[in-house]
Amino acid sequence: MKRGPLILMVAWLGCMNLLTAFDARLGQPLVTHYQPEEYGADTQNWAAVQDQQGLLYVANNAGILEFDGQEWRLIPINDSLSARSLAVDRRNRIFVGALGDFGILEGQRAWKPRLRLPAGQSGCARHRRCGDHCHRG
């Protein structure tokens, strides 16, 4: 029996063992868990998107969190609303769905509401299924 392929395989496995000893994270996902104390907001996050510059936006009960890879910044929204959903369009605008409100982040990332539901109708936004009565003028 030829020993060449066997020796080659053992040597290859030995090299792989040596390489993995240098980085214990090899083969594991690169995930970092942040505590609420680190990002300075509520414990509940609802959605996350990344813009074209690589900034991360997180919909949080305290507002919108912006993360540049090193620092967190909290962007408050109207009446201390809870941000629930986020989306990014091709023009790099961040759309925000909040409890009873809808808006957009533009320019210096200030909250710019585009649509405000009437005060009497805002409870409808708490439900996933809104009927026609929510959209009457």
Image: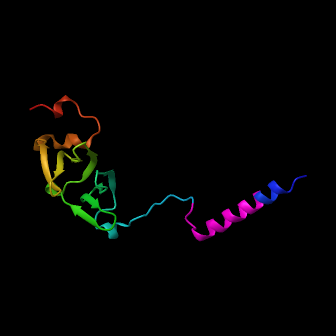
Which region of the structure is painted magenta? 9-26
Q: Is residue 45 left or right of residue 131?
A: right
3 or 131, which lies in front? Answer: 3
Q: In this rendering, is residue 118 above or below 71?
A: above
Q: Answer whether residue 16 is magenta in the image.
A: yes
Q: Residue at x 27, y 45 (%)?
A: 87
Q: In this rendering, is residue 117 above or below 105?
A: above
Which residue is the extreme one toward the left? Answer: 137
Does the magenta stretch mainly form a helix, a strand or a loop?
Answer: helix
Q: Position of residue 118 (x, y in %)?
A: 10, 41
Residue 109 occupies quadrant: bottom left
> Which quadrant is home to the C terminus?
top left
Q: Answer whether residue 99 is magenta in the image.
A: no
63 or 93, which lies in front? Answer: 93
Q: Residue at x 91, y 52 (%)?
A: 1
Q: Position of residue 25 (x, y in %)?
A: 55, 65
Q: Position of residue 98 (x, y in %)?
A: 22, 48
Q: Residue at x 22, y 31 (%)?
A: 131
Residue 129 occupies quadrant: top left
Q: Residue at x 59, y 70 (%)?
A: 22
Q: In this rendering, is residue 47 above or below 76?
A: above
Residue 63 occupies quadrant: bottom left
25 or 132, which lies in front? Answer: 25
